[in-house]
Amino acid sequence: MRVLTGLPKQVALICCLQLFYSACLSMLVPLMSFFIVEGLGSEPWQAGLYPGILLPLTLVANRWIGEKLDQNALVRRFLLLSAFAILVAALSLTQVSSLLALILVVIPFMVLANTGAGTVFTFARFFAESRSFDIDKTNAWVRMTVSLGWMIGPALSYIIVDQSGFDAAFLTAFGLGLVYLVLCWIVVPGDFHKAQNQSQKKDKGGVNIGLLVAGLACVGFTATNSLFVSSMPLFFVTETGLPTSTPGLALAVKCFMEVVVIFVSVPLARRIGPRPVLMISAAMASGSMFLFAQVETVFQVVLVSIVEGVYYGLFAGVAITFVQSFAPDRPGRATAVYMNSLFLGGLIGSVSMGFIASATDYKTVLYVASISSLFALVILVGTKRVTLKPA
């Protein structure tokens, strides 16, 4: 049975799994700095302690789980682990009353909760291979549901906080987490693991230069996005004098274009290759950041947001397949590298934005974001001889 536009039913269920996970997690992650300052009464600088501790631990956890999945570990166990962790974290957030309690109680569970996305991506890859499904298309659909989840979660959480407070938002995330838990049990067979015939084609376990280079390019993209998202509201409203609704409008246009372009990226990558698609994306990313720094009207913001959505849609639709192509026999490791590049780029962008803006202004942050994309482009151009293996 196929649903939607020829999408196999099983892949549609995996997309639902990723959607509810992403919606649940995205209700918590963007809210944390606001909760630390407004809910716990901590100083603004202390909000940086939370991601500073959480993200390095998440990098380690993602790598460890990726290796276990490549070694034929049961997928459902790790998905259930992430589901239980996100439920405990959401409930714990309704009880913590200090930053110390947040660090000691919530962070350990959020580390495990953060591994869910990578595990779902790896499961989708394993499943597509075992059923001879189109891997590129499967990756694109699953990645699209991440974007949809992040369109829903942050907006929902802030609306609930505004109307009913932090606890109500955390309990709503708990409810979404319950749905995610049920889907983990229903969608993922209890005995499912990496196919045995795949695991017989192991690599030598050494350093995979191509995989690291691909991950480094992704860091450049995600640092650009993080720098822009963290500085954009203040640049538009404070420095440019645009209406307070402008940041929300820009994000809405960008997200809409991103979802549409993700599906275009798959046939485009088949025609010209994933690396050229990412090179086009990097050039557009750099250009869009430069253009954002010049905007003076809301209409100009909308036009540039369309370009931004196109570049990020191309990146989102192709990047995971591009990274996995450097380690087709170790998709768990490759997916962990991909996810860790997203976390690392986000950390670099969010931390450096404050320092750059304090030393100069928010427009300069956008110029640095443009340079970050050029960094990704240089990596992609300079490593053309690093060949991809069939995905």
Image (tube, helix red, strand yellow):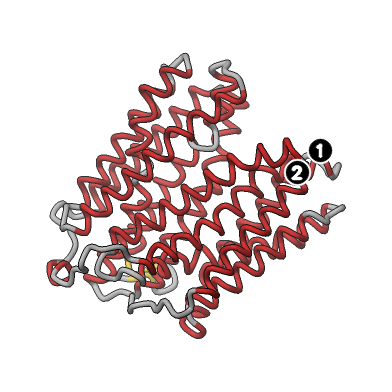
Q: Position of residue 188 (x, y in %)?
A: 23, 54
Residue that label 1 marks: 238
What residue do we see at 30% from left, 58% from top?
A: 333
Q: Is residue 106 left or right of residue 282?
A: left
Residue 315, visible in the rendered structure: yes
Please report contact status of discs 2 and 1: CB closer than 8 Å, yes or no. Answer: yes
Q: Which residue is mark 2?
A: 362
Residue 96 or 100: which is nearer the viewer?
Answer: 100
Of label 2 and label 1, which has the lower sequence position?
A: 1
**Horizontal and vertical percent for residue 356?**
69, 42
The part of the image, by quadrant, that contains residue 286 is: bottom right
Residue 176 bears which disc, if any? none
Residue 281 percent coordinates (x, y): 60, 69
Q: Between label 2 and label 1, give the one nearer the viewer.
A: 2
Q: Name the amino acid, label 1.
A: Thr
Q: Nearer the viewer, residue 275 or 301?
A: 275
Residue 246 image position (x, y, % from top left): 76, 46
Q: Quadrant of the N terminus?
A: bottom left
Q: Residues within 10 Å of mark 2 (few under 14, many from 20)?
A: many
Q: Residue at x 39, y 34 (%)?
A: 175
In this picture, is 290 found above or below 229?
below
For residue 82, what is the image quadrant?
top left
Which of the image's four quarters has the C terminus? Answer: bottom left
